[in-house]
Amino acid sequence: MNTIAKLLIATCMACSTSAYAKPPSIAPSTPPSDGSKQECLIIGDTTAFELAKALRQRGHACDLVAFKNATARQLDRQVPYRRYSVAYVSLGIADTGNKHLESDLRTMRSHLRAPKVVWVLPYERSVARHIDANAAESGGLVVDLAWWPTHDGLHPSDYGPIADMIVR
């Protein structure tokens, strides 16, 4: 894999809040130790990482591909060649000003091997509009972070309610 991808690809079994700050070497995903199957992929930026952690705390082990300041184009290059029942995509803030965002999102969607894709819309409204349009075009679902409180305008204050909602 390329050096652009300072990336964490792992099962979110022992997620720590500092894991995305200094990503480890790329490693293949591994099955959870409790014997359950990973049927979901979470791919994106630091918001994706925190969402994976919240889902894991609720008993949902997903493969995770996340790194700080991830763009759609960078993430597309890291989509695992594996089928999932659902993929959660959370990106956007690093794509502010990306003139090719719509094309990058379409390309990424075509590489995701999941019949159901849930796009997490960022707080940044201009990027959220592009992601929402892509989701509508491809039949994807959206979760809009604008409905949840934030302390910094980038990340939700609490990922728990979002995790609870998306697993329903």
Image (cartoon, helix red, strand yellow):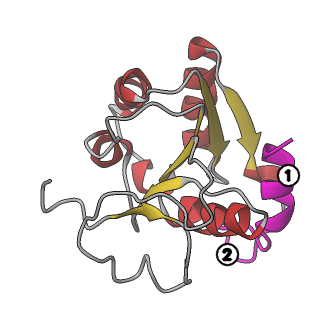
Numbered mark located on residue 152 in the image? 2
96 versus 6 height, above or below: above
Q: In this rendering, does residue 154 appear at all? A: no
* Image quadrant assignment for residue 54: bottom right
| CA gap, disc 1 and disc 2 | 14 Å
Q: Position of residue 144 (x, y in %)?
A: 75, 44
Judged left or right of residue 153, residue 16 is left
Which structural element holds mark 1? helix
Q: Position of residue 81 (x, y in %)?
A: 31, 35
Count of marks placed on residues: 2
Which structural element holds mark 2? loop
The chief SS type of the magenta part is loop
Which is more toward the observer, 74 or 41?
41
168 versus 70 height, above or below: above
Query: Which image quarter is the C terminus in?
Result: top right
Is residue 159 magenta-colored? Answer: yes
What are the residue bounds of the magenta stretch?
150-168
Type of amino acid under label 1: Trp
- Residue lying at 49% horizontally and 53% vertically, measured from the top left: 63
* Image quadrant assignment for residue 113: top left
Mark before the other along the chain sequence, 1 or 2: 1
- Residue lying at 40% horizontally and 68% vertically, measured from the top left: 68
95 versus 119 height, above or below: below
- Residue lying at 24% horizontally and 60% vertically, measured from the top left: 5
* Image quadrant assignment for residue 150: bottom right
Q: Local crowd at mark 1 within 10 Å, few (<14), some, or many (≥20)?
A: few
Q: Local crowd at mark 2 within 10 Å, few (<14), some, or many (≥20)?
A: few
- Residue lying at 58% horizontally and 41% vertically, measured from the top left: 39
Provide the residue designation for mark 1. 147
